[in-house]
Each structure stands twice: as structure tokens, then as C-alpha cells.
Image (tube, rainbow, N blue to C red):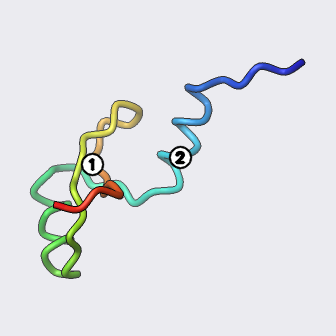
Amino acid sequence: MDRIDPNKIKKENCEKKDRYETYDEANAVRVHLGYTLSIYKCDVCGGYHFSKRLI
């Protein structure tokens, strides 16, 4: 039976998302687009992504 590698899943999920270098960059995009999503620092790539959680 193949085991699921959680690190591989996290990396694959990270690669599907838009990545922002800084929190301020992500926030500027969020404001510009009118998003109400939270921003979080990714422990995989070190960048910032939007989460599914609302602010």
C-alpha cells in the first residue's frame, strides 16, 4: 500500500496558488480585487497566499 506524503501534498497545493513575496504585496492585490480573504505566510515556499478564511 502506498503511503501519502503530506509534504508532497503541501508542495503541490502551494504550487497551485498565486505567490506574493511580501504581506504588503498580497494585501495590495487583495484590496485591489476587493477580496475578503485572509493572508498567510506559507511554510513551504516562504511567500504569502490567500486563505479560504474570510477576514
Is residue 3 rendered to the left or right of residue 18? right
The amino acid at mark 1 is: Tyr
Is residue 42 rendered to the left or right of residue 9? left
Is residue 39 rendered to the left or right of residue 43? left
Distance of label 2 from label 1 (alpha carbons): 13 Å
Q: Residues within 10 Å of mark 2 (few under 14, many from 20)?
A: few
Q: Residues within 10 Å of mark 1 (few under 14, many from 20)?
A: many
Above or below: residue 55 compared with residue 11: below
Pointer 2 or 1: first along the chain: 2
SS label for mark 2: helix
Residue at the image position 16 percent from the left and 60 percent from the top: 55
Q: Pointer 1: what residue?
A: 48
Quarter of the rendering containing residue 54: bottom left
Residue at the image position 60 percent from the left and 36 percent from the top: 9
Above or below: residue 52 compared with residue 43: below
Task: Tell which of 46 and 4 is nearer to you.
Answer: 4
- What x and y, as percent, mark residue 4? 71, 25
Residue at the image position 30 percent from the left and 57 percent from the top: 50
Q: Pointer 2: what residue?
A: 13
The amino acid at mark 2 is: Asn
Above or below: residue 28 compared with residue 10: below
Quarter of the rendering containing residue 8: top right
- What x and y, as percent, mark residue 33? 23, 81
Above or below: residue 51 compared with residue 14: below
Residue at the image position 9 percent from the left and 57 percent from the top: 24
- What x and y, as percent, mark residue 21? 24, 50
